[in-house]
């Protein structure tokens, strides 16, 4: 039961990403075509409906089959990103979050592989629906829901904001390295 919250957080993240693609399928359509797969707004929206269905099934019904489907989707996402990088290069954008410009980078592959692995570990026990977990939690399950929300946000930030932060850091590093080195300040002598 230790990884149930992680599975629920990953399902919530998938739900948010799918909703974004339903709203704006353009970036995902481009990414699919760049990866050499059938693309277009209809294809993206159909894939997003599958994602919504899997995420909702995990959150509402739980069970091995929905959780396994969630894990397989994350592993498929990792494979897709790897194929996209091979076909379109390191500057490719994945389209995972609708119109948001999310790079298809190595971190994206790693996060999805880890997500798939964590879901697989959670399958050792059955994954209950959120309502079942909340029934056993204190304070109406608010701490659990907060933890799931924080987990989903953290995973989302790893895919969206962290790559931009790392890119900015790489751009600034040469500036820091080229800055003139100043001698360390000298402390005034002690008076006796």
Image (cartoon, rainbow, N blue to C red):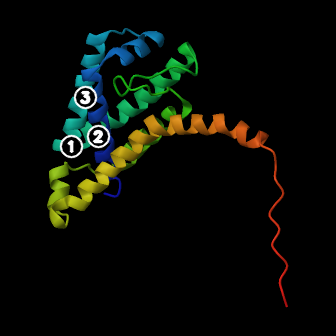
Real-space Cα distance between discs 2 and 3?
Answer: 12 Å
Residue 140: % across, % down: 15, 62
- The image quarter in which residue 29 lies: top left
Q: Is residue 70 above or below residue 23?
A: below
Q: Which residue is outermost to the bottom?
A: 192
Crowding at dot 1, Cα within 10 Å, few <14 / some 14-19 / many 20+, comes out as many
Q: Is residue 103 above or below residue 191?
A: above
Real-space Cα distance between discs 3 and 1?
Answer: 15 Å
Of circles 2 and 3, which is in front?
3
Look at 31% across and 31% down and name the residue there: 17
Task: Residue under label 1, please give it.
Answer: 59
Residue 13: % across, % down: 32, 39
Element type where label 3 sits in the image: helix
- Dot label at residue 11: 2
Element type where label 2 sits in the image: helix
Element type where label 1 sits in the image: helix
Crowding at dot 2, Cα within 10 Å, few <14 / some 14-19 / many 20+, comes out as many
Task: Looking at the image, tell me whether mark 2 or mark 3 is earlier in sequence order.
Answer: 2
Task: Looking at the image, tell me whether mark 3 or mark 1 is earlier in sequence order.
Answer: 3
Q: Nearer the viewer, residue 48 or 113?
A: 48
- Dot label at residue 121: none
Look at 31% across and 55% down and name the residue there: 147
Residue 114: % across, % down: 46, 42
Real-space Cα distance between discs 2 and 1?
Answer: 7 Å
Task: Residue under label 3, please give it.
Answer: 19
Side of 147 where 114 appears, left or right: right
For the N terminus, the quadrant is bottom left
Task: Looking at the image, tell me whether mark 2 or mark 1 is earlier in sequence order.
Answer: 2
């Amino acid at each position: 039961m230790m990884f149930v919250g992680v599975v629920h957080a990953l399902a919530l993240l998938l739900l948010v990403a799918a909703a974004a693609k339903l709203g704006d399928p353009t970036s995902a359509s481009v990414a699919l075509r760049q990866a050499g797969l059938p693309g277009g707004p209809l294809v993206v929206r159909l894939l997003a409906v599958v994602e919504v269905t899997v995420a909702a099934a995990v959150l509402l019904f739980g069970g091995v089959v929905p959780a396994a489907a969630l894990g397989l989707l994350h592993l498929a996402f990792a494979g897709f990103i790897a194929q996209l990088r091979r076909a379109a290069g390191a500057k490719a954008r994945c389209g995972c979050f609708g119109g948001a410009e999310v790079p298809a980078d190595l971190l994206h592959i790693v996060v999805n592989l880890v997500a798939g692995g964590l879901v697989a570990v959670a399958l050792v026990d059955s994954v209950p629906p959120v309502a079942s977990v909340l029934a056993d939690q204190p304070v109406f399950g608010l701490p659990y829901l907060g933890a799931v929300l924080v987990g989903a946000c953290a995973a989302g930030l790893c895919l969206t904001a962290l790559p931009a932060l790392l890119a900015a850091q790489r751009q600034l590093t040469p500036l820091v390295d080229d800055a003139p080195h100043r001698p360390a300040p000298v402390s005034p002598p002690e008076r006796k």
